[in-house]
Amino acid sequence: MAAHIGSTQRPKSLMISFLIIAIMVAGGTAAAMVLRNPIHCILALTVSFAGIAALYLKLGAQFVGFTQIMVYVGAVAILAVFAIMMTQSRRIPVAGIFSRNASVGLFTASAVFAVLGWAILSQPGNGPAVQNTSVSVQQIGGSLMHEYVLPLEIVGLLLTAALIGAVVIAMDRKEDAE
Amino acid sequence: MNGLQACLLLSALLFAIGLAGALTRRNAILVLIGIELMLNAANINFIAFWHYGAATPRITGVMFAVFSIAVAAAEAAVGLAIILAAYRHSRTTDLDAMNSLKG
């Protein structure tokens, strides 16, 4: 696969950087899903998230890349570590880490990947040329305030509702029992 | 294979690994992480199609990805809160042991 990436339009250094990012992402993700200790899983996941951020930076979406680092590496991974520590599932499980009917899930995932891969690779080989190389934060801020102001407000409302809901759900209701 | 196909293949691989994790892991937190990985795969598609897409001054793909990250963050917070509440109730995060709807 690696030998063909960008053989038409891209210089070799871009191909190598994509290969490194792909190895980071795929390896980190696979490790996150097969490791036994949940804390190690989260560490591997952080590597994968950082690789995805690097991919965004490489594709010219700087703002999305840094948002990815802040939100996923900074918040979601830490949140998951907190959840693991609060539920004491940091103890390494003695029983299996996979569910009883894991083979069905594995088969489903392989079938999905096969279909997606077939659909992608069956397209004609010389695809579109690179059109959008970068977007500035100023552009993003401007359109957030003009074109996308309603979605921005809705997302703000959604985040507020979700975070208040999360606090309410996770709150310990000892008083209610009395 | 061109650059767009390489990005889409990476995204499909990420989606498949996330799906496999969500379907097979026993720890509820790691199932949630698998779902997050699938959302990330969708984000990679947004950015890849924006990067290789039609040349317009619009930045729709980037905005899609930003809003999608915001929604994914909300989903992670609520999901982990639900896992904490379920843990407080049943004292386990093992999904094979959480097999009763009745408290």
Image: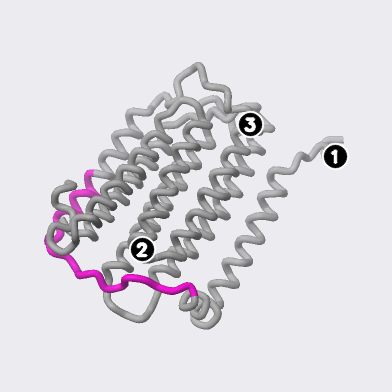
Q: Quadrant of the C terminus of chain A?
A: top right
On the image, numbered disc 3 is attached to which residue?
A87
Calculate the distance from the C-alpha at mark 3 to the C-alpha at mark 1: 22 Å
Identify the mark at residue A148; answer none if there is no mark. Answer: none
Q: How packed is label 2: few (under 14 Cα within 10 Å), some, or many (20 or more)? A: many
Identify the mark at residue B47; answer none if there is no mark. Answer: 2
Left or right position of B11 against A65: left
What secondary structure is marked by label 3? loop
Query: Mark 2 belongs to which subunit?
Result: B
On the image, numbered disc 1 is attached to which residue?
A175
Looking at the picture, how far across and down is residue A85, in whole percent? Answer: 63, 32
Residue at x 60%, y 49% (from the top left corner): B77
Calculate the distance from the C-alpha at mark 1 to the C-alpha at mark 2: 48 Å
Query: Mark 1 belongs to which subunit?
Result: A
Amino acid type indicated by mark 2: Ile
Q: Closer to us: mark 3 or mark 1?
A: 3
What secondary structure is marked by label 2? helix
Q: Which residues are magenta?
A: A114-137
Q: Is residue A1 above or below residue A62?
A: above
Amino acid type indicated by mark 1: Glu
Q: Are marks 3 and 2 on the same chain?
A: no
